[in-house]
Image (tube, rainbow, N blue to C red):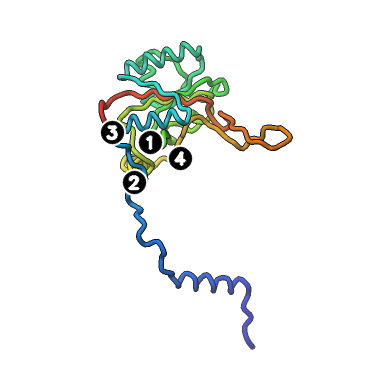
């Protein structure tokens, strides 16, 4: 009596046959190693990054050195009359402590947050994006209405490939559990306008901060 073959066995047989058969690739000459992004001639990585960052509605503050950064940060806090500024990173807290800037370093009163101040892993010149990780605290990169980032010119890299290689060199097997590329303030175009004919509106701050402000300390005069 012929043994009955189930539907599951038929499917598995076809899968095994497909795995054993390797078709010849139609795209054998594709270069997967060269950089997709090329720095424009005569333009530094810093200039490239700033142009892209402003294009995606980021607010850029140039700082000649760390003292200049603190001075301009104090002006911003005073101008906005912020009372609930949060920071969870040791390196950023050291800068704030040395300058006498008060901040909250625990999650109590987090619902009152007006701004967060974090660092970052790197800055991408190709897209104007900022790479953050769990080291920079996920809640402080998505929860506040204003996200302030303090970074250094030496952190600017060309693209994602270069930024990830730096992460591998920096952390090895202890890679942070979360990596996120922030490209300008949070925005979405998925919210309908509410009119009779469906129209899509771009809404800023729908899933994160309304403002992204970068204080860039110039620790490298050329790149």
Callouts 1 and 4 close, C-beta under 8 Å: no
Considering only order in the chain, which callout, 2 or 1, is on the residue closer to the N terminus? Answer: 2
Q: Which is in the foreground here, disc 1 or disc 2? A: 2
Considering only order in the chain, which callout, 2 or 4, is on the residue closer to the N terminus? Answer: 2
Considering only order in the chain, which callout, 3 or 1, is on the residue closer to the N terminus? Answer: 3
Q: Residues within 10 Å of mark 4 (few under 14, many from 20)?
A: few
Which residue was labeled with disc 2? Answer: 35
**Of 92 and 68, which appears nearest the observer?**
68
Which circle marks residue 178 in the picture? 4
Q: Which is in the foreground here, disc 2 or disc 3? A: 3
How far apart, in angstroms, are the residues tagged by discs 1 and 3?
A: 18 Å
SS for callout 1: strand
Q: Residue at x 54, y 30 (%)?
A: 208
Considering only order in the chain, which callout, 4 or 3, is on the residue closer to the N terminus? Answer: 3
Which residue is the extreme one toward the right? 196
Which circle marks residue 124 in the picture? 1
Q: Which is in the foreground here, disc 3 or disc 4? A: 3
**Of 71 and 175, which appears nearest the observer?**
71
Considering only order in the chain, which callout, 3 or 2, is on the residue closer to the N terminus? Answer: 2
Q: Quadrant of residue 3?
A: bottom right
Callouts 4 and 2 close, C-beta under 8 Å: no
**In this image, 67 relative to 178: left or right?**
left
Which residue was labeled with disc 3? Answer: 42
């Amino acid at each position: 009596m012929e043994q009955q073959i189930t539907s599951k066995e038929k499917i598995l047989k076809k899968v095994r046959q497909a795995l054993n058969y390797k078709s010849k690739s139609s795209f054998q000459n594709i270069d997967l190693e060269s950089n997709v992004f090329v720095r424009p001639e005569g333009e530094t990585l810093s200039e490239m990054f700033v142009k892209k960052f402003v294009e995606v509605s980021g607010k850029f503050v140039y700082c000649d050195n760390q003292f200049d950064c603190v001075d301009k940060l104090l002006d911003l806090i005073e101008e906005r009359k912020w009372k609930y500024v949060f920071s969870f990173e040791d390196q950023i807290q050291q800068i704030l402590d040395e300058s006498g800037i008060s901040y909250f370093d625990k999650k109590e009163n987090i619902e009152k947050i007006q701004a967060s101040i974090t660092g970052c892993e790197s800055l991408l010149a190709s897209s104007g994006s900022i790479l953050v990780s769990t080291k920079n605290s996920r809640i402080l990169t998505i929860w506040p209405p204003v996200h302030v980032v303090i970074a250094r010119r030496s952190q600017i890299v060309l693209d994602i490939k270069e930024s990830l290689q730096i992460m591998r060199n920096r952390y090895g097997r202890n890679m942070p559990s979360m990596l996120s590329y922030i490209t300008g303030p949070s925005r979405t175009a998925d919210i309908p306008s509410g009119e009779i004919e469906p129209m899509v509106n771009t809404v800023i701050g729908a899933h994160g901060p309304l403002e992204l402000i970068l204080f860039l300390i110039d620790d490298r005069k050329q790149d």
